[in-house]
Image (cartoon, grey):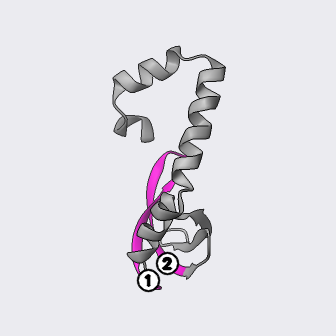
């Protein structure tokens, strides 16, 4: 689970934050993850057919997949264990 990889002190602090504070933090994190420099750096290390790990944030687990397409804002992956296709932001890889 993702929670296992996050420092418990951080989770405790976030648990005490107000809804407004959490929404503000969410907006800041979204902007940081969408930073073109960050995306370019990730894309620079990817190529078609490459096997990568990616985050399934719905279930909080890391999965393995193969890069099948590189789009402007998303990477398309084929999950190796279930053969499902995923279109994810580059920062999920």
Front residue of 62/88: it is 88
Q: Which residue is mark 1?
A: 47
Magenta-drawn stretch, dominant element (helix, strand or loop) = strand
Query: What residue is rendered at 43% in x and 25% in y?
Result: 11
- Label 1 element class: loop
Quarter location, residue 77: bottom right
Q: Is residue 68 visible?
A: yes
Give the mark toward the camera: 2 or 1.
Answer: 1
User: Residue 89, relative to residue 17: is it above or below?
Assistant: below
In the image, which disc is placed on residue 18?
none
Looking at the image, residue 70 sits to the left or right of residue 64; the answer is right
| 46 relative to 26 in the view: left or right | left
* Image quarter of the C terminus: bottom left
Q: Is 9 rendered above or below residue 67?
A: above
The N terminus sits in image quarter: top left
Which residue in the structure is indicated by mark 2? Answer: 67
Instruction: Please give the range of residues in magenta.
Output: 48-68
| 31 in magenta | no
Q: Position of residue 52 (x, y in %)?
A: 40, 70
Q: Are marks 2 and 1 in contact (CB under 8 Å)?
A: yes
Determine the residue located farthest toward the bottom in the rendered image: 48
Residue at 47%, 63% in the rendered image: 37
């Amino acid at each position: 689970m993702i929670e296992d990889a996050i420092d418990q002190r951080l989770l405790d602090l976030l648990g005490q934050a107000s809804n407004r504070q959490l929404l503000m933090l969410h907006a800041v994190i979204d902007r940081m993850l969408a930073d073109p420099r960050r995306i370019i750096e990730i894309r620079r290390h990817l190529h078609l057919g490459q096997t990568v790990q990616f985050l399934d944030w719905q279930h909080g687990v890391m999965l393995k997949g193969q890069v099948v397409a590189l789009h402007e804002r998303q990477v398309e992956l084929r999950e190796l264990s279930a053969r499902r296709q995923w279109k994810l932001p580059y920062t999920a890889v």
